[in-house]
Amino acid sequence: MVTRIAVLVKDIPDLNEVKIDAATRRPQVEAAKRRLNDLDKRALEAAIRIKETGGAEVVTVSMGNDRTRTCILEALAMGADAAYLILDPTLKGLDANATSRVLAAALTKAGAFDVVITGELALDGMGSQVGPRVAELLGIPQVTYAKELKLEEGKFRATRDLEDVDEVVEIDPPFLVTVVREINEPRIPSLMNIMKAKRKPLIEWNAKALGVKVEDLKAQSRVEVADVQAPEVKRKHIVIKAEKVEDAVSMLISALTGDGVLE
């Protein structure tokens, strides 16, 4: 019997390309390129390795917009067999609670699965809530902070990173697992696999197709982001003048010591 694995993947802004508007101190997110969340790529890599060693069908489930399609192609090029994309502008701005409900509905519509894998958090929000919430909504067990996941002799075993101790658990499907960075290093797709990715199934759904009501989801959003601003940085514009370099250095050290920069 082939194992069916669903991987939750999210596209996020490339944090290296996010600029800060000098006037408003707000991040210019829309101008930045999009990429797959790093931990979700590691979740996908874990699924693909199970596929390669024990046999499995791997599908991805995402929620995004038109720009998400390019990122999904990377997931397909890595080795996913198909992708499901929730594409509906009316779902924009949902919090983790409402987003989890949409993803749980998509997983249910996508068909029966044995394992759901996702990263422990998304690097743009760092909430660590979606995975556990989805598991609760689906009514399945969850294994969090996994740094190793294997299918051996028909049994799934995971090693959990609990900081001061590792915990090894054995779990029967269906279940959900969230993975940490240490689990693996994601592969770089070959040019041939990138070309093949364009021919793999990419199924798109909106809210109506999933049977979810947008007004209900927005009512269930518990968190509202009022604003996002970078910390304000003010320079003192202190100029140190001295005839001798030694005196200037001494004055600089005194100023830094007085501000607590040096002890």
Image (cartoon, rainbow, N blue to C red):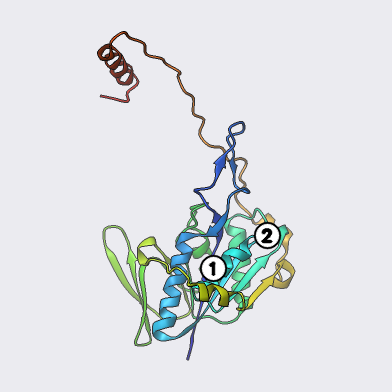
In the image, residue 141 sits, relative to residue 20, either above or below, namely: below
Which residue bears the numbered disc 1? 74
User: What x and y, as percent, mark residue 221?
Assistant: 63, 54
User: What x and y, as percent, mark residue 215?
Assistant: 73, 58
Q: Is any part of residue 182 visible from this angle?
A: yes
73 or 88, nearer to the observer: 73
Q: Amino acid at mark 1?
A: Glu
34 or 40, nearer to the observer: 34
Which residue bears the numbered disc 2? 217
Please state if 126 lies on the left or on the right of 262 as rendered. Answer: right
Q: Quadrant of the C terminus?
A: top left
- Residue placed at 67% from the left, 56% from the top? 92
How many labels sit on residues? 2
In the image, residue 104 sits, relative to residue 156, either above or below, namely: above
Q: Quadrant of residue 195?
A: bottom right
- Residue placed at 53% from the left, 47% from the top? 17
In the image, residue 93 sits, relative to residue 100, either above or below, namely: above
Q: Amino acid at mark 2?
A: Leu
- Residue placed at 62% from the left, 41% from the top? 226
How many neighbours does mark 1 have within 10 angstroms: few (below 14), some (14-19), or many (20 or more)?
many
Contact? badges 1 and 2 (CB < 8 Å):
no
Q: Nearer the viewer, mark 1 or mark 2?
A: 1
Please state if 57 lies on the left or on the right of 202 as rendered. Answer: left
How many neighbours does mark 2 have within 10 angstroms: few (below 14), some (14-19), or many (20 or more)?
some
Q: Is any part of residue 101 visible from this angle?
A: no
Spatial distance from mark 1 to mark 2, Cα to Cα?
A: 29 Å
User: What x and y, as percent, mark residue 217?
Assistant: 68, 59
Of the numbered discs 1 and 2, the one sitting upstream in the chain is 1
Q: Quadrant of residue 61?
A: bottom right
Q: Secondary structure at mark 2?
A: helix
